[in-house]
Image (cartoon, rainbow, N blue to C red):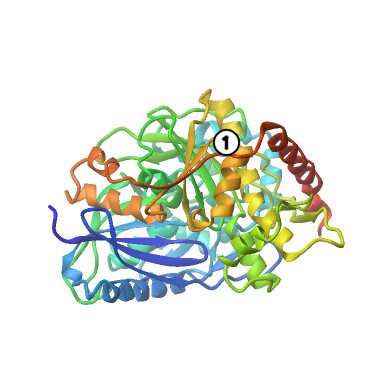
């Protein structure tokens, strides 16, 4: 099947992107719209789930028009990739959300997580899920929603209420409220799913007081789940929704990291380093996450090690929206170039705590080393460099866990086009950094998974051949300076930890 197109919905934290791919894996059309961020209390982050649906439909329409008027009936399948862990609860009959979605960045359940850890439950949870007990994941968010909406748990037990991550929410609405599913990769991010037994875990459901009746069915990442409702999709015939993967797993697939030991980093709102470990779930001694990468059709489920960095691109957004220091993200490159080096200025972007390998929900952002000579350029450089330092923290932990020395790192996402960042990433890692021609590999991975399910592409080998290098960055820093910079980074990180512990 060489004719037609695959439409990919990339529903991210700050907005929704829709891309239309042809058989060559080239982008034929693209559209994007930002999403409103709600911060009702310090540490709380919410989205309007209904707004997510409306924006998604608007962006799909814009992408179809942008492609020179791609007819909807030329779309052979739809793939969905999504911000993970974000928790949506809705009414099964009406499809209306119950309150706002709680975003993965939200820290409101930090004390609940502390209580669980104080009971000695972390090892049990980790053995079943591959995850640490942290507010990042869906389980404590869902428990909070059920605890704080009187009568909701009872309604859920009666089967009247659905839970899902954003993928499940979009599939439900696109299919006319008929299909309630998620895929292996998203289920593995909930704190409720046993990644070895491949089922919702009864012990964890009891621990978090989650009614099983509200959970979606878990399926492969590449299969036909259902068809779009004509009323939702421009009155056309049903189009197969055929691929689902959490955004970071989708990027790993889109980067053609299909073999054990291959790794990628995606620079989005946060940054996420994933290393493919094959059909074995590798336990981490370094507080990394063991996660399901994907399941393709009837093939065995494959796993990955992951380091989750909560704030990278959103730190640049903070420079723009919070401080008004820049008007566009692209300005950070020239600002950073305006100074030869950081001159001792470091930024620790713990705006919502620290993720892997530190896992400190009470850490807070820190800008240190400022002098009278500090300029906007130094601040911009410190923000960009913080992304690279955090990535090295995760890569080193990953190497210790896996016993594999990284040879190169494939990078994608919005910040991968920033040459200052990519060069510094190679410098601080001491290995080559490779940026592909298509940096929106998250959407590409979801498209590939959907296309495989409907026969648009024949095999993973065919997909891997489409990966093409754009720029390769070689390390330039000498080893002594690299280690000196990295040592000072760790000094700054130590100062940021535990800052919010005494907050009421």
- On screen, 341 above or below 31? above
Which residue is more in the foreground, 378 or 288?
Answer: 378
| Residue 170 in the image, given as x and y percentages of width and height | 37, 63
Question: Where residue 74 sits: x, y (%)?
Answer: 16, 66
Res 479 → quadrant:
top right
Q: Residue at the location (71% across, 62% down)?
A: 377
Residue 279 position within the rendered picture, expressed as x and y whole percent measured from the top left: 37, 29
In the displayed structure, does residue 311 sit left or right of residue 348?
A: left
Q: Dot 1: within a 10 Å radius of its alpha carbon, few (fewer than 14), some, or many (20 or more) residues?
A: many
Q: Residue furthest right?
A: 372
> In front: 407, or 160?
407
Residues 241 and 157: in front is: 241
Residue at the spot 57% in from the left edge and 61% down from the top edge: 145
Residue 161 position in % (x across, y down): 43, 62
Taking the spot 61% from the left edge, 41% from the top edge, the residue there is: 427
Above or below residue 289? Residue 353 is below
Is residue 159 something one can see in this rendering? no
**Residue 84 shows in the view:** yes
Residue carrying label 1: 395
**Image quarter (top left, top right, bottom left or bottom right) of the C terminus:** bottom right
Relative depth, front residue between 149 and 82? 82
How many dots with numbers?
1
User: In which image quadrant can residue 108 be found?
Assistant: bottom right
* SS under mark 1: helix
For this orientation, the residue located farthest to the top is: 403
Residue 327 sits in quarter: bottom right
């Amino acid at each position: 099947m060489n004719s037609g197109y695959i439409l990919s919905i990339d529903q991210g934290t700050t907005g929704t992107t829709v891309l239309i791919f042809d058989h060559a894996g080239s982008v034929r059309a693209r559209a994007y719209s930002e999403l409103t961020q709600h911060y009702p209390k310090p540490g709380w982050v919410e989205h309007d789930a209904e707004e997510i649906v409306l924006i998604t439909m608007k962006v799909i329409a814009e992408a179809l028009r942008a492609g020179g008027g791609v007819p909807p009936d030329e779309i052979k399948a739809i793939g969905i990739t999504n911000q993970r862990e974000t928790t949506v609860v809705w009414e099964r009959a009406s499809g209306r959300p119950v309150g706002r979605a709680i975003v993965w960045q939200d820290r409101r359940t930090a004390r609940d997580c502390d209580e669980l850890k104080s009971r000695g439950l972390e090892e049990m949870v980790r053995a079943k899920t591959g995850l640490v007990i942290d507010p990042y994941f869906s389980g404590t968010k869902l428990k909070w929603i059920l605890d704080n909406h009187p009568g909701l748990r009872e309604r859920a037990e009666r089967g009247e209420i659905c839970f899902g991550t954003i993928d499940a929410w979009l599939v439900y609405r696109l299919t006319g409220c008929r299909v309630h599913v998620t895929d292996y990769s998203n289920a593995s991010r909930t704190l409720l799913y046993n990644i070895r037994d491949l089922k919702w875990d009864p012990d964890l459901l009891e621990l978090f007081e989650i009614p099983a009746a509200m959970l979606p069915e878990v399926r492969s990442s590449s299969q036909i789940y259902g068809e779009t409702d004509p009323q939702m999709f421009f009155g056309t015939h049903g189009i197969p929704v055929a691929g689902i993967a959490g955004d970071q797993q989708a990027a790993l697939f889109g980067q053609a990291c299909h073999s054990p030991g291959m790794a990628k980093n995606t620079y989005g709102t946060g940054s996420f380093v994933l290393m493919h470990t094959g059909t074995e779930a590798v336990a981490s001694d370094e507080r990394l996450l063991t996660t399901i990468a994907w399941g393709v059709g009837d093939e065995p489920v494959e796993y990955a090690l992951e380091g989750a960095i909560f704030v990278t691109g959103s730190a640049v957004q903070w420079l723009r929206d919070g401080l008004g220091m820049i008007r566009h993200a692209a300005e950070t490159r020239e600002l950073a170039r305006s100074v030869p080096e950081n001159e001792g200025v470091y930024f620790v972007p713990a705006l919502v705590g620290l993720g892997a390998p530190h896992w400190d929900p009470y850490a807070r952002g820190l800008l240190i080393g400022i002098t009278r000579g500090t300029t906007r350029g130094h601040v911009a450089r410190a923000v960009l460099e913080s992304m690279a330092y955090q990535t090295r923290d995760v890569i080193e932990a990953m190497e210790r866990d896996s016993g594999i020395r990284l040879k190169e790192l494939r990078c994608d996402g919005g910040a991968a086009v920033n040459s200052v960042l990519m060069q510094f990433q190679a410098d601080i890692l001491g290995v080559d950094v490779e940026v592909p021609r298509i940096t929106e590999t998250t959407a590409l991975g979801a498209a590939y998974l959907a296309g495989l399910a409907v026969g648009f592409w024949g095999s993973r080998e065919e997909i891997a051949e489409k990966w093409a290098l754009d720029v390769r960055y070689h390390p330039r820093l000498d080893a002594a300076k690299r280690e000196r910079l990295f040592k000072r980074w760790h000094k700054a990180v130590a100062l940021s930890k535990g800052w919010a512990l005494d907050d009421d």
